Each structure stands twice: as structure tokens, then as C-alpha cells.
Image (tube, rainbow, N blue to C red):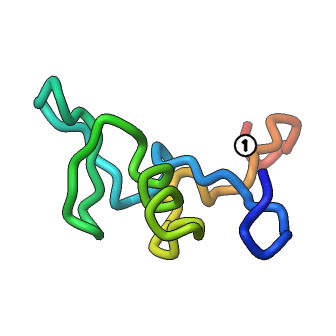
Amino acid sequence: MKSRHGGVMERINCLQCVHYFNTWEKDRPRGCRKYNFKSMSMPSQLVRNESGMNCQSFEKKAHFKKKDMDLNDPNLW
């Protein structure tokens, strides 16, 4: 996927964002607390369609920031 400026845009996964939430509304099941809206599509996709840029407010949830655990590490056992 290319941006308007010719660079390649990275896809943002809203499920990993601290601002993403699920709603109980059938017509608008996904939401963004940062931008205060609900929609049928993923919030990052809606932001990209409207602004032409990736979401600038994306913040990874803490458990996605952790590096992979090495199960061979003797300190774990």
C-alpha cells in the first residue's frame, strides 16, 4: 500500500492499540477512545481513508510491547 507521497504505508492493527474498544452496537461495533467515534470498519482504516495518513495516535498495549520470552532461559525454571 502506498501513501499519497509515494512511500509505503504500514498497516496499523487497532486490536493492539490502547484506544481501541468494542461496542455493543450492531451497526458500529468498533470504536476509538482517542478520536471519540464508533464505526463499522476498523478505526485506523477510517482515519487513513479520511486523512490519507496512518493514525497518529496509535499506542501499543503494554502486553504487546514485551519482547518474546525465551523458554530456554534457566532463570525461568
27 with respect to 62 (left or right): left
Q: Name the residue under label 1.
A: 76
Residue 62 visible here: no
42 with respect to 60 (left or right): left
Image quadrant where one finds the C terminus: top right
Q: Which residue is drawn at 60% across and 53% down?
A: 12
Q: Is residue 51 above or below residue 2?
A: below
Q: Residue 33: percent from the left, percent from the top?
A: 24, 62
Q: Residue 59: percent from the left, percent from the top?
A: 49, 67
- Residue that protrudes farthest toward the top in the picture: 26
The secondary structure type at the circle numbered 1 is helix
Q: Which residue is drawn at 47% across and 54% down?
A: 44
| Residue 32 occupies quadrant | bottom left
Residue 7 visible here: yes
| Residue 10 occupies quadrant | bottom right
In the image, what residue type sits under mark 1?
Answer: Leu
Q: Residue 11: percent from the left, percent from the top?
A: 67, 51
- Residue that protrudes farthest toward the left in the picture: 25
71 with respect to 21 (left or right): right
Q: Is residue 32 above or below residue 69?
A: below
Q: Residue 69: percent from the left, percent from the top?
A: 74, 45
Front-lying residue, 17 or 11: 11
